Image (cartoon, rainbow, N blue to C red):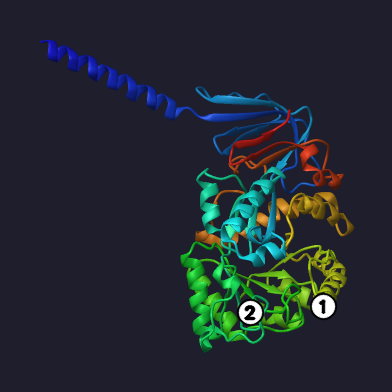
Amino acid sequence: MTIFIKCLVASGALISAITAFAQTASQTSATLYENVRVFDGTAEKLTAPTNVLVVNNLIKTISSKPIQIPAGSTVTVIAGGGRTLMPGLSDAHTHIWLTPTLDVLMQGDAKQLNDIAYKTAKEMLLNGWTTVRDMAGPTVAMKNEIDAGRAIGPRIYPSGTMISQTSGHGDFNPPDALPRSLGGELSLGEKFRITSVVNGRPEVLAATRFNLRNGSSQIKLATSGGVSSADDTPTVHEFTFDEIKAAVEAASDFGTYVAVHAYNPVSVRRSVDAGVKSIEHGQLLDEATVKYLKNKDVWLSTQNFEEFHPPYTPFQIEKEHQVVTGQNNVFKWALQNNVKLAWGTDFFFQPDGVVQNIQLSKLTQWMSPARALKMVTHDNAQLFAMSGPRNPYPGKLGVVQEGAYADLLLVDGDPTKNLDIVADPAKNFRVIMKDGKIYKNTL
């Protein structure tokens, strides 16, 4: 009898514990933004005073009327005070793993470089960048750590290694170093999984499929020369049509797309004809090729570069000047012809810090503040979504809409009228939320 009673007591305790756990698990976390004016990612002006309810990681309700909190929710109420609520910023062309200065990178200390990369990712998020597309570097593991909540940083769309030909933009071997196919060794960039130096259709296929196996959401090739590379120029054409086509075919088989580093008209047209969906840079294009992008429904993911002169040779400084000189016309033609335009920073060999925010604020030399904000929220998100079934974040990004991911900034002032506001995120970004979680709140 005593044993029977003890069993009943134990069973009751177990049932109570299970019930308590079920109740806790069923509770939702909610954040209510009261009295905010919304930039939804597309409109030119802010809304009238509005309330926005976030439940878990999604925007649940947007209303000018008071919003009922879901029963059983753990609620954080934020008094917006008429501030601007807008989507988190996104950078379509980052290099999180390449922000150390060149001398630090060349020392080849993998742990130090990894530590700097994680620090950079955290700084990006705390400056309002909730999503980035990383265009060369070993960021898949970092992305997974961030997504699992074990590290702090933005959502990452990783490309893995940048695929380059021998003597191409991603080949950082000494001039007399033999290619691997001729018995040479891996370059420093290849050892760190920043680049893959390959030649011919079979090697391009292997490099593309390696990146896909390793978790890349899209593929990046270098099909023209560049500024930071030691030997080639932005006017050089790299990879044959068949080599580019091989990467496109392999990526398409996995439901995603190829983006290419390319500056000049010949390289861009060859890439587009091979099926590439995104041109990165393009500052040396002519107007006819910009219109060609429009006609072929291809994205131009570009930047506003400046001549900041990292430890460059005179040859690299001359190339940098050439690219910076060409960008004014490209922005003008792309906007005039309604090209699908995305934007990123492409910073490397220097800590990012708030430089991303400062560069964003300078876009007003070509477009209105609202147009610039649309590009770095809604428009960039449309490009990211082209990774299809490989999209790690398949919900709505870059907008303040019901059902969208709750990646939100609460901002002092109206950035649709004064874009300089974004240049000082420490002061003006009062709340930073990503995936429904608040990472900064200074109210």
Where is residue 186 shown, x and y percent of the image? 54, 77
Where is residue 9 shown, x and y percent of the image? 23, 14
Identify the residue shown where x is 67% and y is 82%: 270
Where is residue 174 shown, x and y percent of the image? 65, 81
Q: Quadrant of the N terminus?
A: top left
- 294 over 149 or under it: above or below: below
Q: Decide: few, some or many residues near mark 2? Use Cα within 10 Å; few <14, some 14-19, many ≥20.
A: many
Identify the residue shown where x is 54% and y is 25%: 74
**Which mark is on residue 57?**
none
Q: Secondary structure at mark 2?
A: loop
Q: Residue farthest to the bottom?
A: 182
Q: Which amino acid type is shown beneath numbered disc 1?
A: Asp
The disc, 1 or 2, on the residue closer to the chain's N-terminal end is 2
Q: Is residue 233 visible?
A: yes
Q: Residue farthest to the left?
A: 1
Q: Which amino acid type is shown beneath numbered disc 2?
A: Asn
- 14 over 262 or under it: above or below: above
Locate residue 304: give its quadrant. Answer: bottom right
Q: Which residue is mark 1?
A: 286
Identify the residue shown where x is 71% and y is 45%: 128
Q: Nearer the viewer, residue 180 or 325?
A: 180
Q: Is residue 346 visible?
A: no
Q: Nearer the viewer, residue 110 or 350?
A: 110
